[in-house]
């Protein structure tokens, strides 16, 4: 039926069907073996997804694998990477642990990959050690004031900036190589002992645990920018960074506490029971490493390998050419129970419940639903990025929204959601209909607002949602490259109870079924809450007659950004004859168009309008974000085209290109940099005016 | 009615209403005074368009002016540009005519602008004269073999390459300045005398006639690339060319016939009754100019001025958010009877007939129709380009097609049409329903096929349509920047009867009502035929239930390009390990998707399908061309994004980026240039695969 709206009783049925035991068994199956991208374990998960999605009783309409030939980086099992301290005569004084310590049979699996920095070049070098805090530009700058960095090895802790930045920022100073570790201060609330404090006694990271990761500067396959890596292409050149390797805090402790030189500033100090010094450079003469140097022997190699996305579709009944996309990556670094298999388990439970309804003929969504089980996310969001490159035009024209669930459950305290402001309302609506795990007769929404809230001019006190300004998971290409309304959702911590920057076993060999079921979500009730909440959102996006995308909430975010920009920059720009009026006018145009459109919707009886009138309104809402794309706005940022949500290094809660251009001009003082600020203001104003005009039917 | 199809009886009524006298009186009004962009005459035409489009009895639903602040270039009326020959002691030996000779009161109008090269920088210089044929790269190269070009002035004739190229190509050789003229061979079938041969005795160009023009390298406003020139922007820098000035053949004759040096090659010779020599450099010692130099005193100045588009809308009844766009530029160089007022007269007759129907409540199109009367086209398609920059996202999402009628009637022999192959079928259909002017009981179609035809694998012998690969008129931004199915249509010559490269009065002070009504289209019957044909196309695009865009005809063009590419490049690319298979597969995918879609359409009873099913098919057809856009495919070509129709310098009837990359690699032989060929093949294959997938509903 062309005019049918979402069926509330169907949503209730769906909510009732989502089952904790099913999710638990999904997770058990997915985490039997490590499933790093393109390994045999990965292929096992591909087969598992296909089996489930092609199941005659609870599968989807269609499911298939889509392969890409992508450039990956691995350590060499025959020549493990080594980090050692050597004396001037090359006597080995200390060797960092090559593999994480075994506590359960999981760590013992021969397929556990040695902790490494993917895309670090191979090489052999040594140098005096220095401590560079988080490897931020300001950290190296500070360190450079106290010593000559040329020829040194810098040890840094995770946090503050992205992984690759720790190496990129070091290069200008002539640093030879970089080590990175997780400080117990940042992950373990200071705890360090595996006798009784860390896993398997708690969720905290054991001393030998090492966060693996991808150390490259942009998302997607490195060798095929803007082209889907389907093989047979001219591969593109890229610039390699300096050598980098991760180590556990067990080894970092030994290295850092032996460092010579002046004491580092207070905010550089971590949880080790010693003073973190800058380094002489090098070690104290009183230490066992006196005159020793740190030596890195990295045998990483790169290889173009075939990586699979698994795709599945439920075909829409009324508007098959409108897609609600839902994605989760499938590949992990090791067993990946939390990252990503918590999300995969949730996705499989969603498709089981919905697929069963479809197979039984009880339900078929109005719009098509496309599920993506992305490959090679851990190497830099590769599967999802290649997918968007391959289907750029089609997805741009037809995608209603993208829902990303990577890690479904970081912890079991509260919902966390980020996304385009237009999706806020539907997320709230769904969250109100799901009961919070572990809290009696409270909804996920009411529980959420206790942990995170803000005051909205339009809605009063509401939960605080985040924006998707970075490239932290597979939403990146959908937000930044395609301009599709996107959201990322999970259950997470009570931040008043821990300072951990992420769950402690993240990207280590301890991220296992045992860890998840004991410490992250016993009983899988938070998994269930996420499945219910996100499934509710998914069904509403797919079935609502009027798309539940709210343009007034978008206007509120733009006004908030505008106010911040005027406050931060207005006084300085006026005297330079750089007017903020066009930007103010554009935001006002957007607000007016949003108000008019909502007024029109409210005054219409959509169920009795022609289907084409409803489609017209839906297209205005669906395509709104496309108007914010400008492929020329950020020439130095790969695939970043969305002028509102692009990443920014300025750290201001306002328009990213403006904030970065302003910061740059302010620091250089050059006339041409102020011209760039002016130019970016024009780019931004035109995009917002364009988005406003997308909300108007004819002229 | 949501399911109503185009009404054939309405088309018949429309055809009957189109009136030659109305067109004639439109033209008379429009050409009363010169109406160069932003002059008082231009403002008069703005007022005239607004009056007509806002008329209560025959106007449109809405009409308004849209202003842009654009960068224009003018000669200084107080310091006219001068081209002279001077002796070594600076005695003036010859002065080129500053204004065209008066034959009618039209040329006498004080608002006739001095012939000049817009965007030539101002400056004063002199040098020995050389003859450089058409100013192609090969022409300067040839000339450079016989002499040192540094410090010379080159005289070139129109044709062969674009205007600006004649200056750009000269610069590397150190040429100081360039003259350009129209050789009687290229425009007058050799005739030169105004006693009895040229206008006012015929349509041929008088000796003093000078083609004005814009000498810049890309379309749109120079100072606001990719941003609508709405004022208050950071203006962008641009690179100035060397000085250039046009002169009449009256003066060119005197200069060229006095040139010293060896005789130029046979294909450099024009219609003058002397041998065209290369130049000594400079003149023959036996000539009156012995030792003389050519001196250019150019006083052009640039100014940012407000230029208006006049916009008009008929709002669609069923799908107001689908736009059929129709445009014509309004500005001329002088009176512009043919260019562009023949087209403006036709547009006004269309809007009169359709507007009357709308005002009387007898008709309202299914889709919205947007009319654009573009400003400042002569300066480089500025009004239309700024419009597309301003409404990029909205037009991308909603425009069904763009119809361009610039010069409606070049001559009265036959129809000429260029455009996306998907529009071929509807143009044929319309042309079959209109009778050819001056030919008894023959349709425009049957007359056309006699002048230009080709054999199509699918349709047999049909009229030959062109492609819109360049930027010759306002379709450029719609085709290349937005990827909207576009067409350009006119009545034109019998090429067996004249070798004129364009109608002889083009861009001169002789392009007047008198000229048009006497020599181009007496009785305005060809104007009527164009109005009928293009109006028929317009109504079908606006009213058809199923959009009349044919994807199989697109497939035929792609196959044709592919076959040419394989023939030209296949043998060379194979041994270099650059496979054409992905391109072949992509074209085959496109053909299959087109066939499947048409099969589905044929087997459907669209009038009894849901309106959303019809809309889905229409969206697939409408958005097909968007998939061919790649903003990164041609980084050096401003606003060229369409990988099938972009301009190309290789001169091969195949994919432009591939042809240019191949020509470049073949000439340099460098490995990296062959890599570029490979890369462009990937870009092209992905775009065609993307377009194929746009023709498929879900996956
Ligand atoms: Ca790629
Ligand atoms: Ca512009
Ligand atoms: Zn993840
Ligand atoms: Zn991860
Ligand atoms: Zn024109
Ligand atoms: Zn013109």
Image (cartoon, coloured by chain):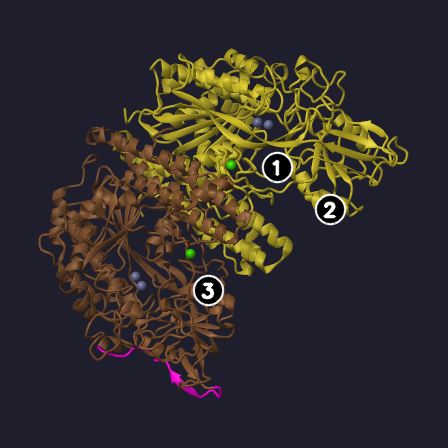
Chain colours: A brown, B yellow
Q: Is the magenta stretch mostly helix, strand or loop?
A: loop
Q: Residue at x 40, y 23 (%)?
A: B313
Please tell me which of labels 1 and 2 falls first in the chain: 2
Quarter residue A100 falls in = bottom left
Image location of residue A681, percent across then percent down: 45, 42
Residue range highlighted in magenta: A88-104
In this view, the residue in front, A441 or A371, is A441
Left or right, A143 with reference to B165: left
Ligand 1 is found in the corner quadrant, namely: bottom left
Q: Is residue B612 visible?
A: yes
**Can residue A98 be found in the magenta stretch?**
yes
Image location of residue A385, percent across then percent down: 37, 55
Dot 2 crowding, Cα within 10 Å, few <14, some 14–19, many 20+: some
Q: Can residue B529 be seen in this view?
A: no
Dot 3 crowding, Cα within 10 Å, few <14, some 14–19, many 20+: some
The residue at which mark 2 appears reads as B173
Q: State which chain disc 3 sits on.
A: A
């Amino acid at each position: 039926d062309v005019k049918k709206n979402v069926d509330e009783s169907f949503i209730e049925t769906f909510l009732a069907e989502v089952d904790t035991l099913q999710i638990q068994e999904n997770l058990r199956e997915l985490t039997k073996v490590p499933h790093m991208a393109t390994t045999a374990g990965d292929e096992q998960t591909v087969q598992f997804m296909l089996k489930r999605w092609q199941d005659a009783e609870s599968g989807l309409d269609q499911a298939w694998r889509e392969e890409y030939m992508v450039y990956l980086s691995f350590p060499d099992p025959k020549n493990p990477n080594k980090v050692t301290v050597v004396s001037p005569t090359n006597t080995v004084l200390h060797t960092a642990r090559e593999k994480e310590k075994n506590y359960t049979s999981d760590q013992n699996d021969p397929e556990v990959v040695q902790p490494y920095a993917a895309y670090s070049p191979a090489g052999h070098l040594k140098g005096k050690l220095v401590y560079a805090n988080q490897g931020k530009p300001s950290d190296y700058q500070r360190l450079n004031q106290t010593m000559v960095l040329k020829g040194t090895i810098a040890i840094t802790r995770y946090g503050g900036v992205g992984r690759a930045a720790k190496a990129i920022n070091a290069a200008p100073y002539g640093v030879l190589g970089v080590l990175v570790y997780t400080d117990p201060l940042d992950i373990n609330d200071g705890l360090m002992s595996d006798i009784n404090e860390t896993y398997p006694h708690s969720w905290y990271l054991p001393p030998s645990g090492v966060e693996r990761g991808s150390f490259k500067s942009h998302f997607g396959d490195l060798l095929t920018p803007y082209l889907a890596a389907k093989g047979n292409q001219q591969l593109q050149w890229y610039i390699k960074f300096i050598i980098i390797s991760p180590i556990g805090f067990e080894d970092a402790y030994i290295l850092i506490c032996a460092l010579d030189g002046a004491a580092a500033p207070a905010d550089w100090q971590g949880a080790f029971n010693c003073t973190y010094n800058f380094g002489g450079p090098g070690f104290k003469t009183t230490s066992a490493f006196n005159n020793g140097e740190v030596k890195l022997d990295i045998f990483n190699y790169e290889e173009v390998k075939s990586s699979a996305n698994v795709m599945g579709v439920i075909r829409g009944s009324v508007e098959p050419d409108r897609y609600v996309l839902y994605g989760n990556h499938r590949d992990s670094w090791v067993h990946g129970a939390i990252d990503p298999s918590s999300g995969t388990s949730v996705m499989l439970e969603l498709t089981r419940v919905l697929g069963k309804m479809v197979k039984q003929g009880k339900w078929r969504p109005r719009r098509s639903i496309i599920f993506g089980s992305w490959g090679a996310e851990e190497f830099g969001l590769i599967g999802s990025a290649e997918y968007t490159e391959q289907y750029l035009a089609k997805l741009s024209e037809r995608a209603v929204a993208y829902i990303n669930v990577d890690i479904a459950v970081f912890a079991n305290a509260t919902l966390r959601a980020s996304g385009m402001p237009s999706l806020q309302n539907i997320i709230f609506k769904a969250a109100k209909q799901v009961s919070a795990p572990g809290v009696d007769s409270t909804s996920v929404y009411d529980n959420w607002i206790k942990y995170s809230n803000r005051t909205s001019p339009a809605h009063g006190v509401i939960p605080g949602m985040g924006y998707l300004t970075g490239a932290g998971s597979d939403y990146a290409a959908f937000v930044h490259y395609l301009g599709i309304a996107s959201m990322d959702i999970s259950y997470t911590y009570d931040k008043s109870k821990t300072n951990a920057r992420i769950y402690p076993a993240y990207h280590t060999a301890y991220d296992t079924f045992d860890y998840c079921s004991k410490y992250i979500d016993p009983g899988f009730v938070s998994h269930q809450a996420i499945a219910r909440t996100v499934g509710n959102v998914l069904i509403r996006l797919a079935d609502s007659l009027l798309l539940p995308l709210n343009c007034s909430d978008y206007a509120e975010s733009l006004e908030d950004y505008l106010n911040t920009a005027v406050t931060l920059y207005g006084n300085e720009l006026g005297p330079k004859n750089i007017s903020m009026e066009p930007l103010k006018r554009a935001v006002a145009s957007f607000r007016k168009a949003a108000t008019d459109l909502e007024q029109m919707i409210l005054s219409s009886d959509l169920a009795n309008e022609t289907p084409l009138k409803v489609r017209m309104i839906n297209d205005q809402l669906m395509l709104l974000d496309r108007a914010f794309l400008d492929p020329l706005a950020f020439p130095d940022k790969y695939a970043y085209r969305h002028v509102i949500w692009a990443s920014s290094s300025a750290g201001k809660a306002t328009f990213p290109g403006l904030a970065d251009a302003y910061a740059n001009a302010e620091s250089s003082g050059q006339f041409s940099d102020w011209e760039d600020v002016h130019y970016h203001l024009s780019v931004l104003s035109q995009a917002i005016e364009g988005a406003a005009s997308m909300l108007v039917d004819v002229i």
